[in-house]
Amino acid sequence: MEGRRYFLVTMGCQMNRHDSARMAEALYGAGLEPAVSLADADLCVVNTCCVRDKAENKARSAIGRLAAWKRRRPGRTVVVAGCVAERLGPGWLAAFPHVDAVLGPDRLDALALVAAGPAREPLVSTGFAAGVPSDFLAARPDLVAPGPTAFVTVSKGCSQHCTFCIVPAVRGGLRCRPAAAVAAEAAALIAAGARELVLLGQAVNDYAHDGAGFAALLRRVGAVAGLRRLRYTSPHPRFVDEDTVRAHADIAPLCEHVHLPIQSGADPVLHRMGRRISREEILRRIDALRRARPGMTFGTDVIVGFPGETDEQAGETVSLVRQAGFTQVFAFAYSPRPGTAAERFADDVPASVKAERLRRVQDAADAVADAHRRSLVGATVEVLLEGPSDRGGGSWQGRTRNNDVVHVEATDGTASPGSFVEVAVTETRPHCVIGVPRVVDR
Ligand code: SF4
């Protein structure tokens, strides 16, 4: 193993980025060093995503390009991991004979089998384990120091079966981790220097283990000594219950920002998507959270051009973005995914109409976000510094509790990643605000 170096290519969502971090720790623990570039590496893992067809095509191109890379040095190893590994399994070997291992998202522990070099036979490991605690790879802060923000997995898979979503097929049904294991990993990360924790799951607030629900988990993690900020992603609006609302009122570290995917603002579309919640109920739950924690802001995910979506229904999504005041919106044009219920629906919204609806949602979202950022000018906000800003001049970049990106003019030199700074906001820019530091709290 001596001298072998690994390179990780990560595509897709936060869950994949988290899995990549766990794989990096496993490889480091097995004696490999991180490579500075692909050219420098002996083992390359491509952690794939198939939530949208563009991401899956990107994964195929990346794997295809590794054939020439592998030929250039004996012993090089190509690993396909993540959702497309799960979806195609041994199909990868037929299409790309240079692939040495195919590992589904629940089989990352098998990475150790190819860390030393390609096995005699290609390795294919997919499928879902039975949900025992050891299925969850915990962070190793003893090996790799966490940054200011650290992620903790609370569940895997999802049992909601929204009709457009491939996640249940490629990541399996919901499996929850014991609250004690989540709290222990949270405490270890905070002790190792993390200041902010993000609880991670596909429908994170569908959590239930040993009779305890999501609100109880929030209370347990929220009580970890030294934790300054707590977030979670991504919740389903239908599981925002009264206990969760009360938790937002009671738990000081819980931040005043929730990313709450709505997907659509029109009831007929929500129904066809299998979301099992109405527009009115989504708004009621947002209102309840706002009442529990004044100053709360929300982000969301939106799909436009779902099969059967009319122009009027697309307009209802635009109006919900405005009415709910989402300050961060990730909007996507619908693309059918294999194995989902919606694959059987006629994909009847032309691409040009999807593009137009996407633009309307984005324009509305930009207007809401601009107004929110302007409202911050003159205010003093708490910023958790993440690292140097690309604005240069010794300035820093960080986030508020409302998840606003802030560029902070040069501090007095005592700040570092993980410092909290009181910042007076002076001006806005697209996607961020600028401010000057008042107080640094290391
Ligand atoms: S709740 Fe989220 S992850 Fe689960 S099926 Fe629906 S969209 Fe997919």
Image (cartoon, rainbow, N blue to C red):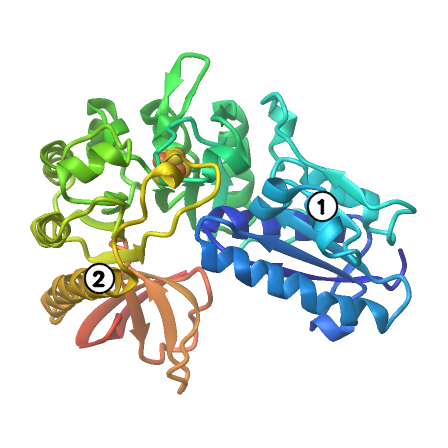
Ligand 1 occupies quarter? top left
**Amino acid tagged 1:** Val
Position of residue 278 measured from the top left corner of the image (x, y, whole percent): 15, 32
Taking depth in this image into account, of 74 and 254 the one nearest to the observer is 74
At x 75%, y 49%, the residue is 93
In this orientation, does residue 388 appear? yes
Q: Which of label 1 and label 2 is nearer to you?
A: 2
What residue sits right under mark 2 in the picture? 353
- The secondary element bearing badge 2 is classed as helix
- Rendered image quadrant of residue 41: bottom right
At x 34%, y 28%, the residue is 219
At x 88%, y 47%, the residue is 119
- Rendered image quadrant of residue 35: bottom right
Q: Quadrant of the N terminus?
A: bottom right
What residue sits right under mark 1 in the picture? 102
Taking depth in this image into account, of 238 and 392 the one nearest to the observer is 238
